Image (tube, coloured by chain):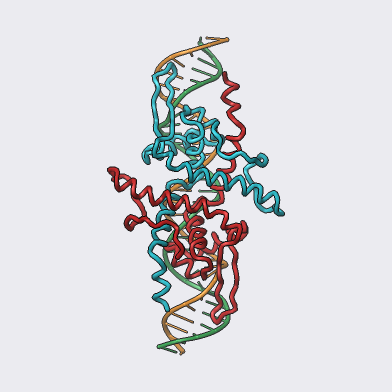
Chain colours: A red, B cyan, C green, D orange
DNA sequence: TAAGTTAGTTTCTTCAAGGAAACTAGTTTC
DNA sequence: GAAACTAGTTTCCTTGAAGAAACTAACTTA
């Protein structure tokens, strides 16, 4: 009776590991927002990206972008302009995260609705009202 | 020319906020794994859940479950058994995260393949080999 | 009666995530 | 020539996430 419990499905364990992998990559305050922004916009300069994400500091943004670049999710291009600019864009591989990020955004949108419909008092969301539009191109 | 940049789509900002909300709820080492486990199994006792998730300590599990319960994603039921047991299960609302978690798991599975196909050396995954099965019931 | 089960809580500790502000360095505009 | 833009880096600091181990408390089995 003890053995049975331990053997609970291999596929299950594998899925748990896969979830662990993904969350290791995406966890934290900023990565998903950055990737989401880049998927929505394609090509942003450092400062524009900083402004679009909103609230993130230069150090953080720089650090997160380096990690995303190492993981082949984001491509960095230095432009030969007057004051030097750097463009960031999502890679083809990075686009494979589109569905994940879409679902995350969609759930967030419905979650707001859920909270405002039910007797919500205990949970705080990140300022600003309700929306319907999910994941349109900017 | 400066104004234009600021006005980059309202819908875009809303989506970013929605992403922020969701990630605030799901970020961290354990929550997605816990929810994923409960979606796959329906009803687990505290210790079984601890064993299934694997690696999590009692304190963490207890704390995370409380947060998930407060957010109406998980239901806690105390059973009137000999040594008292407590059952945890996903709520109907919690099931609304199924797609999100599925995509996270699916991406993780393909990400392993991606790394083992490409010249991977720099990234470490959480032990154990590749899989195909994603999100089967246990 | 000692050890093992159940479900946690408590304490103590460490490491990393993240933020603020100052700074580099080159160009451009007022 | 001062101020403001570009893209960062560096330093210094705080807080929180997470883990380890011990503990409660009631019941069970050898």
Residue A66 visible, this orientation: no
Against B127, residue A56 (above or below) is below
Nearest the eye: C18 or B112: B112
- Residue at (53% x, 68% y) in the render: A43
Residue B106 in which image quadrant: top right
Residue B7 visible, this orientation: yes
Against B21, residue C20 (above or below) is below
Residue B99's spot in the image, x, y percent? 48, 44
Q: Say left or right for A121 vs D2.
A: left
Residue A42's spot in the image, x, y percent? 53, 66
- How many numbered discs, if any? 0
Image quadrant occupied by the N terminus of chain A: top right
- Residue at (41% x, 68% y) in the render: B8
Q: Say left or right for B112 vs B40.
A: right
Residue A8 in which image quadrant: top right
Image quadrant occupied by the C terminus of chain A: bottom left
Nearest the eye: A38 or B55: A38
Q: Say left or right for B19 vs A122.
A: right
Residue A137's spot in the image, x, y percent? 46, 63
Residue A66 in which image quadrant: bottom right
Against C15, residue A45 (above or below) is below
Nearest the eye: A84 or B19: B19
């Amino acid at each position: 009776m003890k053995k049975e419990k331990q053997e609970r499905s291999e596929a299950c364990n594998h899925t748990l590991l896969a979830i662990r992998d993904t969350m290791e990559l995406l966890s934290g305050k900023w990565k998903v927002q950055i990737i989401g922004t880049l998927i929505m916009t394609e090509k942003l300069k450092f400062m524009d990206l900083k402004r679009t994400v909103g609230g993130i500091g230069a150090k953080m943004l720089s650090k997160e972008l380096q990690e995303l670049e190492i993981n082949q999710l984001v491509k960095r291009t230095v432009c030969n302009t007057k004051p030097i600019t750097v463009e960031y864009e999502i890679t083809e591989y990075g686009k494979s995260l589109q569905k994940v990020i879409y679902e995350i955004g969609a759930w967030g949108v419905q979650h707001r609705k859920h909270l405002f419909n039910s007797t919500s008092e205990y949970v705080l969301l990140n300022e600003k009202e309700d929306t319907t539009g999910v994941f349109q191109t900017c």
